[in-house]
């Protein structure tokens, strides 16, 4: 999984921005969303991305996994990730 | 394992990405740089909003080392999106080197051109380098109107250039400037853009600035013509929905600038000599790439929008719309 060429991610103090350059739309990301997008940009399949997030953040109840999966699904539906 | 639990650990749902809610002042750098790489142009268009034309390069345009120092700063600042315009950007002697540098650093790059240098070889090269899109100005659906507006230009050459882009697989955008003598062709121009393979079509009101000041009496559409123009555009937007995006700004310049006073875009306009403007439609300069870093200019950009002279200029436009004739008399903030 990766970001398409036309989706550009940049970290910001408030989290990050994802710039969809085809339609020239900018999406602002909170810190969690930015963390997910950062891992997508780094590459790997969904499982690997979740694992890296869990290694990075304390997640005993699996909250991050559920939310990250939902978020990835949303990005996929918007065409902002490629498999 | 390191770092803090992210905010969403406490929230039930990660907030969806939403269209930009952060103000540009919240950003560490601009999101978009529109660079007029040269003022030189092979054409002398009646409506040019710059003062471009043959032999009109600024005497102090950035040299090679300054060009690449600026681009390196932009790439190091992770600017995701740039455009090269002019004048005619493809006449710049370093044009392809600049394209190669930006695309090689993975930024998205749009070229805004009059289409007269889009040979099959150049189009293939642009495709190989990976430009995001090439926007070609096609101000008319016929040779008669196009050639009247684009002095020294040739409709058939521009059309051939767009066809070469399509053959090379380069994404195409078309830009259209309305005048009193081509405004009736807007529907045909949108159809032509689609037939040529464009994925986007851009237009809006032609501005009273640059070369257009001298030719305004021969150019400006009447309000009645504009009404019909926008009516057709609304219909064409619906007709091409899902196949080609039709973008147009119906609001006038004053409304746009009033909005920008409250919501500055995360955009820097870079002139051929390295001066940086707040926005194309204002005369205010907020930086100089020869003397300041991009980060310094970005910080000043945020302050400059709050300068009372900016708000005053916009307020004056309500009663003196012809003040846009002075946009090239730069005011340093």
Image (cartoon, coloured by chain):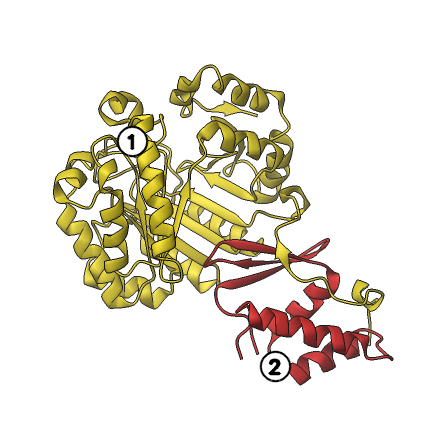
Chain colours: A red, B yellow
Residue B16 in which image quadrant: bottom right
* Distance (Cα) linking label 1 and label 2: 55 Å
- The residue that disc 1 covers is B225
Q: Position of residue B219 (x, y in %)?
A: 25, 27
- The residue that disc 2 covers is A44
Residue B66 sits above or below residue B304 on the image: below
The answer to whether dots 1 and 2 both sit on one chain is no
Q: Position of residue B234 (x, y in %)?
A: 38, 46
Numbered tag placed on residue B104 in the rendering: none
- Give the left or right position of residue B253, taking residue A12 as reference: left
Residue at horizontal 46%, vertical 51%? B82
Secondary structure of the residue carrying numbered label 2: loop
Residue at horizontal 52%, vertical 34%? B278
Query: Which is nearer the eye, B155 or B72?
Result: B155
- Give the left or right position of residue A2, taking residue B42 as reference: right
Query: Which is nearer the eye, B120 or B273?
Result: B120
Specify whether residue B202 is in view.
no
On what subunit does the disc labeled 2 rest?
A
Instruction: Classify the position of the C terminus of chain B by image quarter.
Output: top right
On what subunit does the disc labeled 1 rest?
B
Q: Within 10 Å of the Cα at label 2, are there few (<14), some (14-19), or many (20+) other Cα atoms? A: some
């Amino acid at each position: 999984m990766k970001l398409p060429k036309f989706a550009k991610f940049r970290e910001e103090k408030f989290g990050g921005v994802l710039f969809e350059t085809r339609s020239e739309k900018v999406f602002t990301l909170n810190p969690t969303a930015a963390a997910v997008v950062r891992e997508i940009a780094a590459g790997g399949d969904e499982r690997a991305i979740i694992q890296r997030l869990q290694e990075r953040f304390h997640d005993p109840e699996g909250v991050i996994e559920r939310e990250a999966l939902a978020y990835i699904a949303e990005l996929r539906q918007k065409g902002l990730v490629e498999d | 394992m390191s770092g803090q639990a992210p905010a969403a650990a406490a929230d039930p749902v990660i907030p969806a990405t939403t269209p930009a809610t952060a103000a540009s002042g919240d950003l560490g750098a601009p999101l978009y740089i529109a660079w007029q790489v040269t003022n030189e142009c092979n054409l002398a268009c009646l409506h040019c909003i710059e003062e471009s034309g043959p032999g009109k390069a600024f005497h102090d345009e950035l040299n090679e080392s300054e060009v690449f120092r600026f681009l390196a700063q932009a790439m190091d600042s992770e600017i995701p999106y740039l455009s090269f315009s002019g004048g005619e950007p493809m006449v710049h002697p370093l044009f392809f080197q600049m394209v190669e540098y930006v695309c090689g650093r993975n930024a998205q790059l749009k070229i805004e051109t009059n289409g007269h240098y889009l040979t099959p070889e150049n189009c293939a090269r642009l495709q190989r380098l990976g430009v995001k899109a090439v926007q070609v100005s096609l101000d008319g659906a016929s040779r008669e109107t196009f050639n009247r507006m684009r002095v020294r230009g040739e409709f058939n050459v521009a059309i051939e250039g767009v066809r070469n882009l399509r053959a090379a697989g380069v994404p195409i955008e078309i830009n259209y400037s309305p005048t009193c003598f081509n405004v009736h062709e807007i529907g045909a121009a949108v159809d032509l853009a689609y037939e040529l393979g464009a994925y986007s079509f851009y237009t809006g009101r032609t501005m009273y600035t640059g070369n257009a000041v001298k030719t305004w009496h021969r150019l400006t559409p009447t309000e009645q013509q504009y009404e019909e123009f926008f009516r057709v555009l609304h219909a064409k937007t619906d007709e091409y929905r899902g196949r080609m995006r039709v973008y147009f700004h119906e609001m006038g310049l004053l409304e746009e600038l009033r909005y920008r006073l409250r919501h500055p875009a995360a955009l820097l306009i870079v002139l051929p000599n390295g001066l940086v403007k707040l926005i194309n439609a204002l005369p205010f300069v907020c930086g100089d790439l020869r003397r300041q870093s991009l980060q310094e200019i970005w910080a000043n950009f945020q302050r400059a929008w709050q300068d009372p002279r900016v708000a005053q200029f916009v307020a004056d436009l309500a009663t003196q719309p012809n003040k846009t004739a002075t946009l090239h008399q730069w005011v340093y903030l």
